Image (cartoon, rainbow, N blue to C red):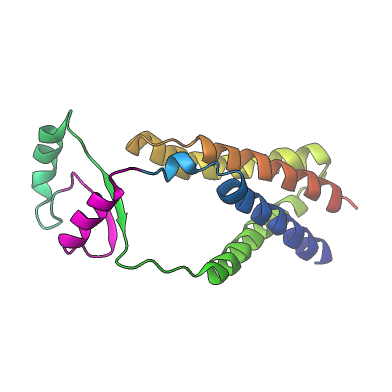
Amino acid sequence: MKKLIIGSLVGGLILFIWQFMSYGLLDLHYSQMAYTPAQEELMDAMTGADLQPGEYYMIRAPKENPEQQAALMEERIGKPWAMVQYHSALEHNMGMNMIRALIIDFLAVMILCWILLNFANLDMKTAVLGSVGTGVMGYLAINYLDSIWFQTNSLPDLLDAILPWTLIGCWLGWWLKR
């Protein structure tokens, strides 16, 4: 139990620090949250349209008329489209967001530790490959799949799937075999 808890705490901290660096210090995700000089006009238009908080795919038919979707998609081929995450007010709750991030990082690494501790012959290579495989599975099934359908840049997410999970694998390969 000690190996599981300490391995998870340190591994979760490694992941948390990487995420801070990736989104903050290194700004690897700038391309996914880029600036546009039209931001004030766009915000004014959305606010003026009385848009409710939510996520919008701007070539979508109303839910009550799904039969319109195919015609709408055909009509929009070659024309602009957008995905929008709209919030009615900016709330800056960095403390709670960081606590939640640290908890999910701990839980993610705890699941990995539990899996690795059930290997009969765990060694450094298996720990690193298992850890990187965990990160890459998450990337492929979520971020990369989204990038296929919505034509977004997922390279920063691939880096987030490989680099910290390699470090976590090295840590767990050393710690869990002690």
Quick one: 145 or 21, which is closer to the camera? 21
Task: Locate the N terminus by quadrant.
Answer: bottom right
Count how many numbered circles sit on residues in the image: 0
Query: Is 49 placed above or below 83 here?
Result: below
Could you tell me residue 84's position as x and y percent?
29, 51
Horizontally, residue 119 falls left or right of residue 159, namely right
Residue 102 placement: quadrant: bottom right
Residue 105 placement: quadrant: bottom right
Query: Is 156 placed above or below 114 here?
Result: above
**Residue shown at the point (13%, 54%) measured from the top left:** 62
Query: Is 111 placed above or below 159 here?
Result: below
Horizontally, residue 6 falls left or right of residue 39, namely right
Residue positioned most to the top:
78
Could you tell me residue 120's position as x and y percent?
80, 47
Residue 16 placement: quadrant: bottom right
**Residue shown at the point (73%, 48%) measured from the top left:** 168
Quick one: 35 or 106, which is closer to the camera? 35
Residue 41 shown in magenta? yes
Tell me the magenta residue range.
Answer: 36-60
Could you tell me residue 11's position as x and y percent?
73, 55
Residue positioned most to the right:
178
